[in-house]
Amino acid sequence: MRKLVVAFALIFCMILTATAHEVPDLSREGSIRVTMRYGGSAISGGEMTLYRVGDVQEDDGNYSFILTQTFAGSGVSLKNLQSSSAAKQLAEFAVQRGIIGLDRKIGTDGTVEFENLKPGLYLLVQKKAAKGFEIAAPFFVSLPMMIEGNYHYEVDAGPKVSPTPETGPTQPNQEVPKTGQSRWPIWMFVLSGAGLVLLIGRRKRI
């Protein structure tokens, strides 16, 4: 059975002690699947872009994130991911610098999946919303995620989805404005966005 975790703030971190858990396999690839739902229904259409913004840094058994070389010039600190502006700042930096991410269209089932990902901190940005819905706020997901003492390398994330206030679900598609530590389990998974955010850990593949 899948484990569902619901975040009721701008950002949510699960903080666990490192000594009681396994060491993350930094050579193992994983995947991130994003599911767009509203009122229990899948929201199809629109696009999602994935950026790898953080490398895993190990120091004598302690794990933390540091900005990748591509995003190092942003000046955004990954030491305090509780800052609600960090994801937005990195998303704007990517637009300003013309950084190319992995673009995927959201399917008819409301999902989009990114596979063959190495461990790290990822930024997900919705560049085009489904018809009648607002663009979801940028958010972070770390890979792997720890749930109940075990690392999961297949992660599901569900950002908050809101209809447009003007005309509801009939509003045309929107485009994104062109705007310019601790041991590993501390950063087991991180999400940033507005309001209710869902994060689901899936079982490991064998």
Image (cartoon, grey):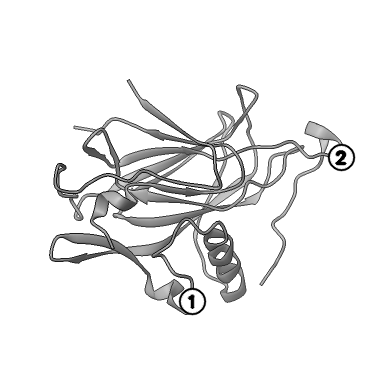
Q: Nearer the viewer, residue 74 or 154?
A: 74
Task: Give whichever of discs 1 and 2 has the lower sequence position.
Answer: 1
Of the 4 image quadrants, the one containing the N terminus is top left
Considering every residue shown, the one lying at the far right of the view is: 166
| Residue name at image x 60 percent, y 38 percent | 160
Amino acid, disc 1: Gly
Q: Quadrant of residue 134?
A: top right
Q: Residue at x 23, y 56 (%)?
A: 183
| Disc marking residue 166 | 2
Q: CA distance from mark 1 to mark 2?
A: 36 Å
Image quadrant occupied by the C terminus: top left
User: Which is more foreground, mark 1 or mark 2?
Assistant: 1
Q: Percent x, y for residue 79?
A: 39, 65
Amino acid type at mark 2: Glu
Measuring from the top left, give residue 198's x and y in whole percent.
50, 35
Q: Secondary structure at mark 2?
A: loop
Q: Residue at x 36, y 43 (%)?
A: 14
Q: Position of residue 97 (x, y in %)?
A: 57, 75
For disc 1, the marked residue is: 75
Is residue 18 depicted above or below 75 in this figure? above
Choose top left, top right, bottom left or bottom right for residue 120.
bottom left
Considering every residue shown, the one lying at the far bottom of the view is: 73
The x and y percentages for residue 141 are 42, 49
Closest to the observer, 49 or 158 = 158
Q: Secondary structure at mark 1?
A: loop
